[in-house]
Image (cartoon, rainbow, N blue to C red):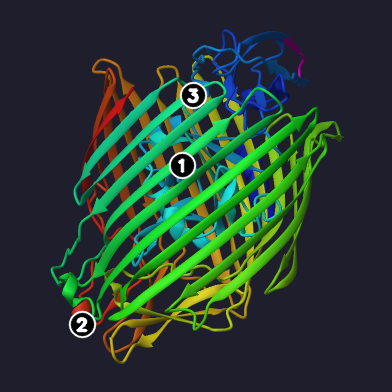
Amino acid sequence: MTTKLLRAAVVLLAAGSPLLAFSGSIEGRVIDDSRRPLPGAHVWLVGLEAGTAADTSGRYFIAVPEPGDFRVVYQHIGYGAETLSVAVGRGERVARDVVLRQTRIGLPPVETRASRQTVHGTNTPEPTVVIPKAAAEQAGKTTIGEAATLETGIQLQKRCSACEASEVSIHGLPGRFSLILLEGTPVFSNLASRYILDLLPVDFLDRLEVLKGASGAIWGSDAIAGAVNILPYQPAERFEARATYARRSYGSDLSGLVGSNVFPLGVSVIGAHGNRDFVDLNGDGSSENSAYRRSLLLANLNYSPGLAWQLNGGGTFGDELRRGGAIVPDSAYYTNPLAERVHTRRWDAWQRTSFTAGDMELTLRLALSRHGEDGVVETRDYSANQTTTYAEFSAGLPHVASGLSFSRQSVADSRLFSRGYAESDFAVWAAGRSITPTVLGTPTDILPALRLDVNSEYGVIPSPYAAVRLYPSFADLNFAVGTGFRTPTVILESMENLPGGYQYAIRRDSALTSESGLSVVAGAGRKLTSQKLITELRANLFYHRIGSFIAADMVGLDSVTRRAVFYYHNLDEVTTSAGAELSASFTVLLGASANVGAYYLHPRSGSNRTLPFVRRWGASYSVSYPYRRWGLELVAGGDVNGPMLVRTVYGNGAIEDHDSPVYATMSLRATKRLGILRIGAGGNNLWNYHQPPLSHHDGETEYYWGPIIGRELYATLSVSI
């Protein structure tokens, strides 16, 4: 079946269009005079609308529309531009590495329509997808978490009502299988990532890098379903400042940025604050959401003295007070079992130092984080904390990269652990680089990788990975297979799919063990470029196999609190998720753009039971159009959400499994620039569809399967200097 689907995807991309023939390409690296890569450098063809931006390693790739001679411009802020004349024969891949030299005053980048295009793949063996800030803005996304959903197969799901936190679900697998990184450094806890995903506006994003499929040897062992690397905005001018305020139906958000880039030092500070009110749609005295007050401060520093080394350092501090369940005064949290109040503080600090000499690059990463919570849960005092240290040293040579890493996590949680818990992990890894043979006359890129973890609790765990990208005449093809594993030791990270209203209690098997994953991903893609339209088509097939999957089963009602009891334990049988996804993006002459995507999942346990809490199919779209007559940019987007298997527990303890309904959502947004100001207004979930709240006085509880809040309107005001 997999072979038939892959053939169908390739035929779909190739049939009926001579434009899909591979005419040739120009590729290579953009580096400075110290041979350091220049990520984000603009590369474009004079007189055409073809262009791209270099990836994090400085690599670029442009498919030419036809054989011929081309003038190629290379440009990066703070560096002098270079123009090359390049001749490309039919089907030829021409390699050109370009050195840009630093200047005191950089020229503004030339922005082609291609450089602002939407989600696009990288030309690396591993199937990495880049989501630039411009694409997220054009699609009407407001937060960094929402920006990730531009990639088909990724869902941003609020599954834990206790923490009112979003998680990134890849191919329907729980968010604990998605590794979140900030500047390439792991953010170890899903609960911690909410400060980045839910609070930071997309205006403060440079780009996201997304790799789907188990890739423990590439990003880290926790990447069972894939990884999302968040690269925040870096200032380019001597002084930059911006601020955004949004007023919503149930709360408000305020964020600001101050930054400066004066060679050789760049500094930025980002602050954000958000609050949400209680929402009690059925008037039963229990809120369907968490009310919270959440603040975040993020600082980042880059120092590049023009020699062979570069320093990046930064840190974050987050503070949150959230209240949920029964809406009561502060004095009643110790007497009402349906009310909860939790105060969270978290801080992170990291640094990355890199040294380049010729074709060799050495990098040292250090990170330290502390996450603490305290409050009142189930009428009792509650406290939890987690401390994580991380260190990594890596070396890159022309055809191989290798490294060592060490991490240690210590956890204490008054609900889930009878004693403190600590775990250490030492890893060594190696990967191939720039392995580009020609196979049967077809240009090919190959990436082999292997990671070996020595874990203090689970012993030696290998994580192999292999990726191949082929460039036949009709499409780009990629294949990847990888593994990863995850240990269940972080604070409440297994709390997915819990229902609204806090009508539940958590219990955990004391013998929980690690989960392991194997993924196979195959894809085909093609980018079409003309003077009036840029189109990118992609199709992927995937298969995930999870061993020792941790499930949360409802096992009845607590006899004292009358809460539904969720019991977390490892399944004895293998769990799988297989499916396909299709996506297309379009950018046209007047700056309009559109994205469409669809996916289908087949999640099953080893006994062929449908897995609960996984949406089995869905589709999404977004359209952006600049209405020049009034100076407006209009954005429309939405989703069609297929069914998922959910569970309802009734007041008598009975449990019922059933499919959730199919429903659609739609959002609209309009923005207008007035000098340094940008004003906007819009609405989310305009069809006002939401999961009907149950009366918690009757003891009923249901898993999340849809929005718990209906239509929400908002207005924004931004200032940029």
Distance from label 3 to label 1 (Cα)?
A: 30 Å
Task: Assess disc 1: are there few (<14), some (14-19) or many (≥20) residues with their C-alpha within 10 Å of its C-alpha.
Answer: many
Up the image or down, 537 lies above or below 411; here it is above
For this orientation, the residue located farthest to the bottom is: 559
Q: Name the residue at 82% across, 34% down.
A: 398
> Which of the marked residues, 1 or 2, is nearer the chain's N terminus?
1
Distance from label 1 to label 2 (Cα)?
A: 44 Å
Distance from label 2 to label 3 (Cα)?
A: 54 Å
* Pointers 2 and 3 in contact (C-beta within 8 Å): no
Q: Name the residue at 65% across, 22% down.
A: 306
| Location of residue 563 by image quarter | bottom left
SS state under label 2: loop
Residue sitting nearer the eye, 241 or 592: 241
Give residue 230's position: percent from left, percent from top: 52, 43
Residue occupied by mark 3: 261
Question: Which quarter shows the N terminus?
Answer: bottom right
Give residue 694's position: percent from left, percent from top: 23, 73
Residue occupied by mark 2: 335
Magenta region: 86-91
Would you say residue 663 is visible in this rendering?
yes
Would you say residue 647 is visible in this rendering?
no
| Location of residue 338 by image quarter | bottom left
Query: Does 374 appear in magenta?
Result: no
Residue occupied by mark 1: 150
| Location of residue 297 by image quarter | top left
What count of labels does the image hold?
A: 3
Question: Which quarter shows the C terminus?
Answer: top left
Amino acid found under the numbered disc labelled 2: Thr
SS state under label 3: strand
Residue sitting nearer the eye, 142 or 424: 424
